[in-house]
Amino acid sequence: MSRKIRIGLVGTSWWAESMFVPALRSHPQAELAAICGRNRARAEEVAANHGIPAVYTDYREMMAQGGLEAMIVAAPDTQHHAMTLAAVQAGLHVLCEKPLAMNSHDAWEMYTAAQTARVKHMVLFTYRWMPFFRYFRDLVDQGYVGRLYHAELRYLSGFGRAPEYRWRYDQDRANGILGDLGSHVIDLARWLVGDIRRVQARLGVFVDRPGPEGAPLNPANDSALLLVEFATGAHGVLQASAVAHLAEHFMQQQISLYGEDGTLEINIPWGGPQGGAVIRAARAQDEQFQTLPVPDSYWAGVDRSDPFAIFTSHPAGARLFVDAILEDRAARPDFGDGYQAQRVIDAAMESHRTGQAVDISPGP
């Protein structure tokens, strides 16, 4: 009989249920053995919906009693540090949601603890696995733009426009849209261009929200704009927003790379009748842009209208995490990538606070 990896899931949100549960259930050597949530009724509901045999309200009990080999941390951001350290210290492999932590100090501690314990560790930077971004990255690696001059990356949404309490916009629980969508933008920038060495940022709070249960709110940003300099010397503009009205589109991602040898652009309007990624390119000698379809090999049988299906069929996300455990190899993106993204988040928050550009030193 094939070896099964027993995994416990911490988190019962719609994202935990729609991302991690189907991914694990689709892997023939993954066993979702337990789920943990602070609301037992909700945890039992998810367990009943998906045949998860054990339900807990305390992740420490789940680790002690569940016979686990790995844990997925899909709890709110403030809980990532304690939960991950506890799992690593128990010898469990850990897949943690992004952002890895609330600050780079905690992220570094998580990374070094996982490395010392020699467990597999991964951060779910979702978009690295999308077929269109993988093709876009390969074009960059093949020298399509050559020496990069400047980059623009945007991730816009409107799901923070309602004047209601949401923990992501509570500074006591999260770092706002900068930590949410912004961590994706930062990771994609690092993945496509390289490390960021200087940040100047402006963070905005545009929607007046109530605090939890009527208490005063310490608001976190719902808009973030970063002017960055990469280690290569290239300049960049990174933007994330939760307050952009996008009509029929749920979200929108845009990346433009301008270099000595050419330009690459990708535009992804999520949702709506014209959803889907469009990649346009122009070599330095071209007078017009051309559209570059993503080759079928990157989709490998996945319906182009449902790119998130890669997480239940490709070696991506939680499925790749399981493969890394089974094959005893490193998983990427890992806690080191999460730590580097967190350093940029910290620098952006300091820059906004001081009004000054912040340098990020090479290395740890």
Image (cartoon, rainbow, N blue to C red):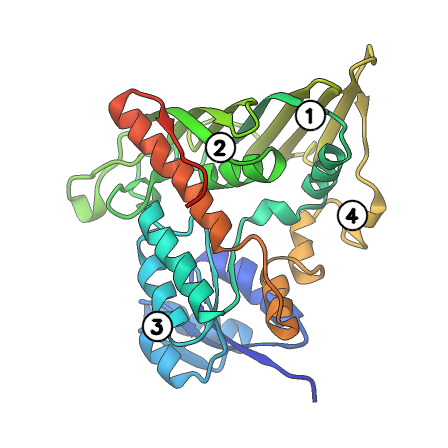
Q: Indicate the quadrant where residue 241 lies.
A: top left
State if disc 2 and disc 3 touch (CB < 8 Å): no
Image check: 126 left or right of 111? Answer: right
In what element is the residue under mark 4? helix
Residues at marks 3 and 2, CA–CA distance in whole angstroms: 35 Å
Residue bearing mark 4: 298
Q: Is residue 160 visible?
A: yes
Name the image quarter holding the N terminus: bottom right
The kind of residue on which mark 3 rests is: Tyr
- Mark 4 or mark 3: which comes first in sequence? 3
Residue bearing mark 3: 59
Packing grade of label 1 (10 A; few <14, some 14-19, many >=20) is: many
- Mark 4 or mark 1: which comes first in sequence? 1
The kind of residue on which mark 4 rests is: Tyr
Residue bearing mark 2: 196
Residues at marks 4 and 3, CA–CA distance in whole angstroms: 37 Å
Residues at marks 3 and 1, CA–CA distance in whole angstroms: 43 Å
Q: Determine which of the numbered discs, if any, sits on residue 265 in the image.
A: 1
